[in-house]
Amino acid sequence: MKAAKFEYTHASTVADALSALAGLDGACKVMAGSQSLGPMLNLRLARPAAVVDISSVQELRTVTEVGDTVRVGAAVTHAQIEDGVFEPLRGHMLQEVAGRIAYRAVRNRGTLGGSLAHADPAADWVLAATALAAEIEIVSAKGTRRVAMPAFMHGAYTTEVGPDEMIAAIYIPKKNAGARWGYYKFCRKTGEFAEASCSAYFDPAAKVARIAVGALDGAPRYLNELAGRVAQEGLKAADADSIAAAIETITPDKSAVDRRLYATVVERCLRQALGQ
């Protein structure tokens, strides 16, 4: 199929993009890598009156260190992160996750901000950002605000971004030599979205311990109690019964088979994170 008719604006600056958004009263979509919006337009699942292309906005394609965080521009591509183009992301958890997203052709075009804005529950960046407790920088003609990842994603394909707003950047913790992480997902075949996924992040120096489960019906969910025990006791706290009990608390409506799938990704993610 072909997309329904829409007006196209190629923004050169963030100000250009925000001006277009402000003048269309919610009838405009922002496009970066077009890996999510493009198919939706062609299938006519999305029929905006206008599309603002931000893929060439240089302000959105930078990576800088800000205090104890790294600010990653929304239009930075998966491939740039995978290839270590930006020094602050070399050896970072994001670099490892980026290389596992779909296919190289998708990674060449797809962007971090675009994936988060789309908010597919099974998306890699949604889960990784949750495990890292990332903050999302949202901008509009009225100003800038930062929203913590747990509050950013309201549910499947629904976020905190308003009709006259867009994502400008994502703030994540700097890489830390003492931090450990894991990321594991089940897909029927390479390139497909996950059917179950888990990401874990432990940083003893910052007293951080998080285990996040993705590919649920909505936003990823934390296993806070299990994460705390693993941080204190190591893998012995993540026995099969403990993981199963933790999974049951966040999947009350899932079948036994589905719960086993989620429990397995948690187990393998933790073994990856803790080096076993």
Image (tube, rainbow, N blue to C red):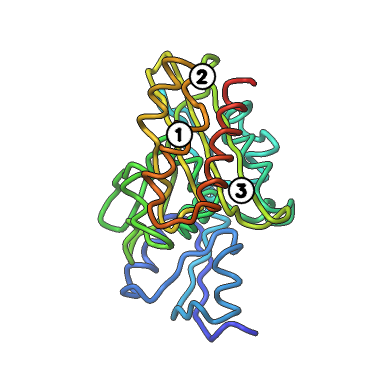
Residue at 49 percent across and 51 percent down: it is: 113
Residue 94 drawn above or below residue 116: above
Residue 236 tag number: 2
Comparing 59 with 233, the one in front is 233
* Residue that mark 3 sits on: 77
Residue at 45 percent across and 78 percent down: it is: 48
Mark 1: amino acid: Ile
Looking at the rendered structure, the secondary structure element under dot 2 is: helix
Q: CA distance from mark 3 to mark 2?
A: 38 Å
Q: Is residue 98 left or right of residue 120?
A: right
Comparing 159 with 77, the one in front is 159
Looking at the image, do the residues carrying marks 3 and 2 touch, with CB atoms under 8 Å apart?
no
Mark 2: amino acid: Lys
Q: Nearer the viewer, mark 3 or mark 2?
A: 2
Mark closer to the chain start, 1 or 2: 1
Q: Nearer the viewer, mark 1 or mark 2?
A: 2
Q: CA distance from mark 3 to mark 1?
A: 25 Å
List x then y, in percent, for residue 202: 47, 23
Q: CA distance from mark 1 to mark 2?
A: 15 Å
List x then y, in percent, for residue 257: 55, 52
> How many marks on residues?
3
Q: Nearer the viewer, mark 3 or mark 1?
A: 1
Mark 3: amino acid: Thr
* Residue that mark 1 sits on: 211
Mark closer to the chain start, 3 or 2: 3
Residue at 49 percent across and 26 percent down: it is: 238
Q: Residues within 10 Å of mark 2 (few under 14, many from 20)?
A: few
Looking at the image, do the residues carrying marks 1 and 2 touch, with CB atoms under 8 Å apart?
no
Q: Residues within 10 Å of mark 3 (few under 14, many from 20)?
A: many
Looking at the rendered structure, the secondary structure element under dot 3 is: loop
List x then y, in percent, for residue 183: 58, 36
